[in-house]
Image: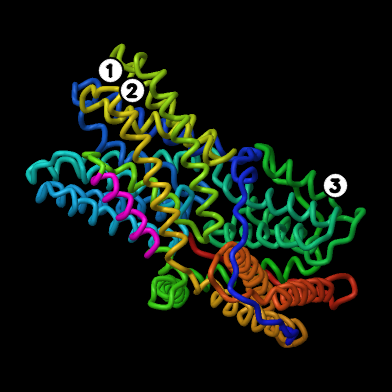
Amino acid sequence: MTDTPTRPGRPSFRSLPLAPALRLSRPSDTWFKPALSVVVASAVPHLTLLAIGRLDLVMYTLAGSLCALYGHGLPYARRAGAVAGVVLGMTASLAVALVTASLTGSTAVLIAVGALLAAAQKVLCDATRIGPPGHVIFTFVSSAALFAPQRPEQIPGHLALTLGAGAFAWLVALAPALVRREGPERRAVARALTAAAECAADPGSRTRNAAAAAVHAAWQCLLASGRPTPVRRSLERLVVHAEAAFAAPRPGGGVAGPDRLRAWAALTRARGPVPAPPPAPGTADELYGIDAERAALRAPGGRRAARRVLLRRLGPGSPLLPVAVRTLAGCALAGYLCAALGVGRPYWAIVTAASLCQANITLSWNRALQRTLGNLLGVLVFAAVLPVSRISPLALVCCCLFFSFAAEALITRNYWLGSVAVTPMALLVLEFGGAHPAGELIGDRVLDTVLGAVAGFLAATLVTNRRAAGRVERALDATGRARADAERTGADPGAGPAARDRARRTLTASLVELREAGDTAAGEWWQRALPEQRLLAAEQAGHRTLAATAQRRGPGGATPPAVHAPSIGAE
């Protein structure tokens, strides 16, 4: 880490963008997976309730069905536990909401509980990094349940419906493993190869940071994927090539030049066999290190270390605390404003405010624009489709399923575009309990949206997040330590392959965290000036170290010993 001095600056605020927040992007390469999953997970419970004439219970099964939206970027070994945790968390949130609704009819109390739940859901989702879609789905379900009539004796049955639908959603989320066991790993590695190809073709700070993040994500996916298989071995060798390409990019070509990396990415993403790359420098050592690290992560000590990391994210000094306070304040303010204006069930204002509470003010501003535009257009779509949905109960079910698919298909292009489909779906869910006047639904939703957006952004502006700059300082220190450790371990002839490769991956992870911390702090107001020169110098030094350690494993370095990977037991 450099000691480059930085001039002190005043706490400042940056201009808020308009057009970039609404610009459409390319859809995600996996947009269809959550879209199809939520349709299948919702269709079976919906049609079952339709068959028995109890569509009024859709809200409780929908809470479990929405759990199928989570975990699609995780390998199936990790996805099983993650989605199970989502189902349990959803059920717990719903239980709190239903018990509260059964005990009191006070709007003030219901809003307070809704705001507290939203803040807790935000913190837990950010700390566990479960998402997308993150905390908004939890808040939508619990806030809606708070304002639904409820009797204590009904609660066990309603929670059983949620657990049953959640169990089916769990099966839907894991079903693709029967067809393509290494699908998530293949997609993660393909992204890493594509990002490395862009870096090799056009080396620069932007492409190098993107490649580092993609390679880090690929390693994390492979480490969590379960016992080694021939396909995973090939994927690990491909990531070694991607890592070497971004660590020491050379425009033009070579064995792992941009064209070859792109070709490997296309074959890896496709359904055919994984390409078999030529041996990369240090491949034997790298794979030995992966096996050793995988075994360490699964050992009791590794699990305890993971729990300690999670507790630090939730501790008193957590950078998530200001965002939680923002969420609490924004949701409470939105709810009470709507209640003061006569909205009987202001849960949509709470959900809107919760969705606006992002990592910094700039992101909150973007989400405010996107949410407001999407919801206002969405109520127009709802007005147009409402007569169709009232033709029959089956038509209502089909409309809800269609908008569920459309929301996930569009939201990766831009959040506002997905909100155009989310809004009519949420409004149609109310129709399962009985028809409501269209004008009342549309008027309340517009009012809730506007007040929720104003309250959420006001909370993001007034509740300062001065810990963002502190997170940058900690990330700088962590990157300096990781770089020193990687240099020391790489130069030590007695260091084992597991230690060398773990040090490299730790340095890559620290660079990704440093860039994320810097981007978060750059979009935050009311804080001291960022050490931008130190950030740039630390990133450059870290990438130089990665390049140097990659070259030591290359043709000019010592030939790595042929080490057989230790066997890992089945999960």
Q: Which residue is mark 2?
A: 397
Q: Magenta span has 536?
A: no
Label 1 residue SS:
helix
Q: Earlier in the sequence, mark 2 or mark 3?
A: 3
Q: Which residue is mark 3?
A: 259
Q: Please tell me which residue is depicted at 41% across the width and 59% down the height of the picture.
A: 459
202 and 184: which is toward the camera? 202
Q: Residue 518 — which label?
A: none
Q: Which residue is mark 1?
A: 393
439 and 483: which is toward the camera? 439
Residue 180 screen position, x and y as percent: 56, 41
Q: Which residues are magenta?
A: 325-340
Q: Quadrant of the C terminus?
A: bottom left
Q: In terms of image quadrants, where is residue 347? A: top left
When the figure is inspected, residue 132 is found, relative to residue 393, above or below; the finding is: below
Can residue 163 be seen from the camera position used here? no
When the figure is inspected, residue 455 is found, relative to residue 510, above or below; the finding is: above
Q: Residues within 10 Å of mark 1 (few under 14, many from 20)?
A: some
Callout 2–callout 1 Cβ contact below 8 Å: yes
